[in-house]
């Protein structure tokens, strides 16, 4: 009797990723049509752009599954150095141009690259490697803990010059979560975390537009046609969705009432068109994705593959935090932040970076199964 071949990938991870990307493309096609029409580029223009980025991202992800995780561990410092260089280049006047008051994109012909998306992953790869190389110092000395904090501070400083406060919050929380799961002494966190919270609080109120966002977040209806406009329109979309939504293509808010409806606020359009049932299904898909990611990390740790486990946890934290923040912004639980919904929102850099993360996860899972 022929022995049945074992599956060398996680089918539930594949299912959740495929479902999120497919649903995301449908929602981008629906939400971006009015924007594309206003730009006189054809109703499906932005959707086809997203399809191209999805194709590139999937090709990159598949390629990464053939690269040993040890390669990322060996060259983690190089990836981090390149990301720092890109973050510095984007700040050079004349090299790029501001969009909505921020210098976050590098333009290479018709292609735009957002270095902060790559910096998130590079920092996860570096910290995961550091946790393996300096395990004893990290767990037993304050100096071992302060070195990654210094690296994090450099990245955060460059991001704040863009400015990109949302990315700083996501990266800082992810790295602290990785270090905590890696066994760093609790007293080091008790020393650092209050200081870090004070710094983030100061940064949050140091800019007038961030203060205005916070005020609008507390009561968007008080200034519903100015600072609270975006959140009000998002909440209206959720209200119109009710239980089962208005159907694909049936959103009213996407008709240029809700800004960034195909990117930062695509979840609001999804809620309007698919209703509460659709929202719960999407939350379940993200929950499944994160659960399988953490399971892959746990299994890697149990097999003695510390680096694979570290970066799987880091990727899981990145996806979790960015998803929670984006959805919380959409429903009014957090002030407005320019963070996309992973694997779903329109945006080339975010889609490709997310696909890189998924490719790394599949490689870790493969090595868990065959080694």
Image: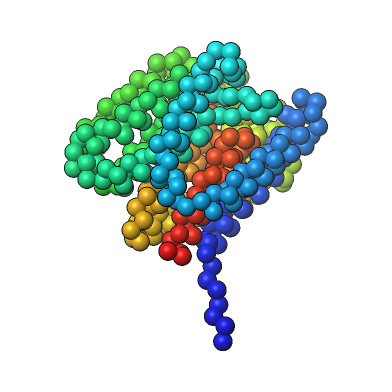
Residue 78 on image: x %, y % = 43, 35
Number of numbered tags placed on the structure image? 0
Q: Colour scheme of this structure image?
A: rainbow
Name which quarter of the figure residue 16 lies in. Answer: bottom right
Residue 41 on image: x %, y % = 79, 28
Q: Residue at x 45, y 59 (%)?
A: 367
Most foreground residue, 322 or 57: 57
Residue 29 in the image: above or below residue 202: below
Name which quarter of the figure residue 76 lies in. Answer: top left
Asked whether residue 251 is in view, the answer is no
Q: Residue at x 59, y 45 (%)?
A: 60
Most foreground residue, 156 or 330: 156
Q: Residue at x 76, y 24 (%)?
A: 39
Residue 92 in the image: above or below residue 324: above
Residue 80 on image: x %, y % = 43, 34
Image quarter in which the C terminus is found: bottom left
Residue 199 on image: x %, y % = 32, 23
Most foreground residue, 140 or 370: 370
Image quarter in which the N terminus is found: bottom right
Residue 107 shown left or right of residue 329 in the figure: right
Residue 335 shown left or right of residue 266 in the figure: left
Most foreground residue, 196 or 303: 303
Residue 47 shown left or right of residue 157 in the figure: right
Name which quarter of the figure residue 298 lies in. Answer: bottom left
Asked whether residue 41 is in view, the answer is yes
Q: Residue at x 40, y 26 (%)?
A: 156
């Amino acid at each position: 009797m022929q022995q049945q071949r074992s599956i060398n990938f996680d089918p539930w991870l594949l299912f959740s990723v495929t479902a999120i990307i497919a649903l995301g493309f449908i929602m981008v096609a629906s939400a971006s049509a009015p924007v594309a029409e206003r730009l006189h580029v054809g109703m499906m223009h932005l959707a086809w752009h997203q399809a191209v980025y999805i194709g590139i991202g999937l090709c990159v992800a598949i390629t990464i599954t053939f690269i040993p995780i040890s390669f990322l561990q060996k060259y983690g410092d190089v990836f981090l150095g390149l990301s720092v260089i890109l973050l510095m280049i984007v700040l050079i006047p004349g090299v790029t141009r501001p969009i909505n008051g921020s210098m976050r994109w590098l333009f290479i012909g018709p292609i735009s690259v957002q270095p902060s998306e790559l910096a998130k992953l590079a920092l996860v790869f570096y910290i995961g490697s550091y946790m393996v190389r300096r395990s004893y110092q990290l767990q037993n000395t304050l100096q071992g803990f302060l070195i990654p904090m210094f690296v994090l501070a450099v990245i955060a400083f460059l991001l704040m010059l863009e400015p990109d406060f949302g990315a700083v919050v996501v990266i800082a929380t992810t790295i602290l979560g990785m270090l905590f799961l890696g066994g760093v002494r609790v007293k080091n966190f008790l020393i650092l975390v209050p200081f870090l919270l004070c710094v983030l609080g100061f940064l949050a109120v140091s800019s007038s537009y961030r203060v205005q966002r916070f005020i609008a977040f507390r009561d968007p209806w008080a200034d519903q046609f100015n600072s609270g406009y975006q959140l009000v329109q998002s909440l209206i979309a959720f209200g119109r969705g009710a239980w089962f939504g208005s159907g694909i293509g049936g959103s009213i808010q996407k008709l240029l009432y809700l800004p960034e409806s195909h990117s930062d606020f695509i979840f609001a359009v999804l809620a309007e068109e698919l209703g509460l049932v659709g929202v719960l299904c999407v939350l379940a898909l993200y929950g499944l994705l994160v659960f399988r990611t953490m399971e892959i990390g746990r299994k890697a740790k149990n097999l003695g593959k510390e680096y694979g486990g570290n970066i799987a946890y880091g990727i899981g934290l990145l996806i979790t935090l960015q998803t929670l923040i984006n959805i919380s912004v959409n429903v009014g639980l957090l002030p407005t932040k320019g963070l996309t919904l992973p694997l779903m929102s329109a945006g080339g850099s975010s889609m490709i970076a997310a696909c890189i993360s998924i490719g790394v996860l599949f490689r870790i899972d493969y090595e868990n199964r065959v080694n």
